[in-house]
Amino acid sequence: MSNFFLPAATLWQRELVRFWRQKSRLLGVIASPLVIWLLIGYGSNTLGRFYAGALVLTVMFSAIFSTISIIEDRREGFLLSMLVSPAPRTSMVLGKILGAATLAWIQGVIFLLFAPLAGFQIGLVEGLAVAGAIFLISFTLTGMGFVIAWKMESTAGFHAIMNLLLMPMWMVSGALFPLAEAHGWVKGIMWVNPLTYAISLLNHTLAVPNVTPGAAESLAVTVAFGVGLLLVCGVLAAQKSTRSAA
Amino acid sequence: MIEVQNLTHRYGPRLALSGVTFIVGKGEIFGLLGPNGGGKSTLFRILSTMMIPTGGHAVLAGHDVVREAAAVRRHVGVVFQSQSLDKALTVEENLRAQGHLHGLHGAPLRERMEHAMEQLGLSDRRRDLVEMLSGGLRRRVEIAKALLHRPQVLLMDEASTGLDPAARRDLSNYVDGLRRREGVTILLTTHILEEADRCDRLVLLHQGKIVAEGTPAALRSRIGGDVVVLETEDTVSLAGGIQRRFGLQPKVMDGQVRVEIENGHRFITEVVEAFPGTVESVALHKPTLEDVFVRETGASIE
C-alpha cells in the first residue's frame, strides 16, 4: 500500500511546497478573472449572475497553470525521474492531479472572499457546500488539463487548445449567460458541455434562484466527468510506447 | 549485469538502432562512445525503460526491460543528460521525494539520504534550493538521487555535459570509486574522449550500429603505430600521391589527410621531401579513440 500512496502523497506535497515558494503565481491566477468579473459584472449590473463563472475561470487558470508544467517537466525536470522510478504510474497521476486540484481549490476559495461584493451571504454550512463544489470542479478541470498536456510536445500547443477549446467551453457553460436564456444551437452545446453542470452546481450551492440544470443532475454530471477524466489520465500514463516518454 | 541482444529501434522509417549486442559484467564501467545521432540516446532510453524497442531484447540486473520494467526500475539508477531535479525544492527535499517514489520512508530513508549526501559532499548544502547550486553541484545531487535506492546498475547519459574539466574529473573519480567500493555496474554514454578512455570497455556506435568493441587500449592498438595528419590545399591529390609512392591507405577528412603508420616521425621527413612545397602543416600523435572511430567509420565523433 505504501508503494502506492507514498509516491502520490509526495507528489501532492511537492505541488504545495512549490506553490508556497512561488506565491506570485497566486496573483497571476486570481487577478485576471477578478478584473474580468468586476468589469463585466459592474458594467452590466450582473455581479451576482457572473460570479460563479469568474470563480470557475480562476480555478481553470490555476488548473492549466499546474498541468502545463507536465510538458516542461518531461523535457527537463522532475517528471524524468518519476518515469524511471518503480512507483505505479497511476499513483503519480493521482498525486499530480490531487496536488494541482488542491492549489486550484485554494485559489477558488480565496476568490470566495469576494462573494459579499456580489451580494452573497455565505454562512458556515453554505460555505462548506461551496468549498466542496469548488474542489470537485478543481479536480475535474485539472484532470482535463492533464489529459491535454500528457501527449503534448510543446507548451505552444497547450495555449492553442486553451484558446480554441477551453475558453469557448467556459463561455458557453452558463458562465456569461444562463442556459435558460441561450438560443439555437449554442443552447444545444450548453446542454452537452460538462462545464455547464459545474457552473450550475456552484450556483446551486451559492443559492442562486432558478438555476438549470437541477442540483442533483449538476452534481452527478460533474462527479461522473471528473471520475471519467481520472480514468483516462491513468490509462494514458500507463501506456507503454515505442516512442520515448521523454 | 547488462545483456543487450540484437536490439533494434525504428522511429517510423528511420532506423536508429540496428542489431546492437553486448554484455556488461558486474562492476564494470562500460562506455557507449559515438557522435550525437549515433544511437546512444535511443539505446539509453530503452535501457532506462522510457521506451520499448521495436526489436531485440535487453536484460538489466536479471530483468527484461520490456516485460519486467518495474523490476528493472527498482534495480537501476538513472542520471539524465538534462536536469531531473526540482529546482524549487532543496537538495534534501529532492532526495526525500525520490526516496518516496521508491517506497522508502522513515529512518531507513533518512539514513540513506545522509549516506548519499556525505558520499557526494552535499551534507552542508542540504537546505539549499537546487536553483542556487552550480552545475557541478547539481550533477552531484543528480547522482546522489540516482543512487539513493542502492541500484545494482547505474546508467549515465552524457553526465558530464556542461561541466568544467575539474568537475568532470571529480565525477570520473567518484564513478570509479563507486564501482570499487560498492561493485555498482556503470553504463555511460559519452562523446568525450577522455571520459571514454577511463572506461573498462566500450563500444563505438555509429549510425545505430556497433563498429568496434573492446578496452580503450585494445581499440587504440588496432592502429599500428602513429597517426600523421597533413594539411594541404589539394588533399585528394596528396592522398593519391602518398598512396602511389608509399603504398599506404590515407584518409581524407575535414580538409586533412590522415595516415596511420609505424615510426611516424620518419614518414614525416619522407613525405615532406617527396612532395616539396605542398604540405602546409604536419602533426603526429599516438592513436586516440577518435582515430579508431575515424578508421572504422570514416567520420569523426565531434
Image (cartoon, rainbow, N blue to C red):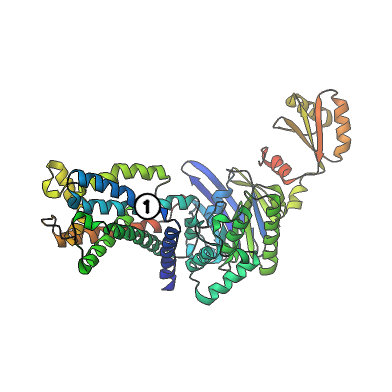
Residue A168 is situated, as x and y percent measured from the top left of the image, at 25, 44
Which of the image's four quarters has the N terminus of chain B?
A: bottom right
Res A195 visible = no
Which of the image's four quarters has the C terminus of chain B?
A: top right
- Mark 1, residue position: A27
Q: Secondary structure at mark 1?
A: helix
Note whether A189 is above or below B183 in the view shown: above
Q: Left or right of A126: which side holds B104?
A: right
Most foreground residue, A118 or B61: A118
Residue at position x 67%, y 65% in the image: B178
Q: Left or right of A170: which side holds B14?
A: right
Residue B243 is situated, as x and y percent measured from the top left of the image, at 79, 30
Residue A183 is situated, as x and y percent measured from the top left of the image, at 12, 42
Res A75 visible = yes
Most foreground residue, A200 or B267: A200
Residue projecting furthest to the bottom? B107
Residue A179 is situated, as x and y percent measured from the top left of the image, at 14, 49
Quarter where residue A106 is shown: bottom left
Q: Left or right of B141: which side holds A52?
A: left
Most foreground residue, B262 or A193: A193
Most foreground residue, A17 or B297: A17
Note whether A180 is above or below B60 in the view shown: above
Residue at position x 43%, y 73% in the image: A2
Note whether A112 is above or below B33 in the view shown: below
Note whether B76 is above or below A178 in the view shown: below
Host chain of mark 1: A
- The residue carrying pointer 1 sits among few (fewer than 14), some (14 to 19) or many (20 or more) residues within 10 Å by Cα, namely few
Type of the residue with mark 1:
Leu
Residue at position x 74%, y 31% in the image: B256
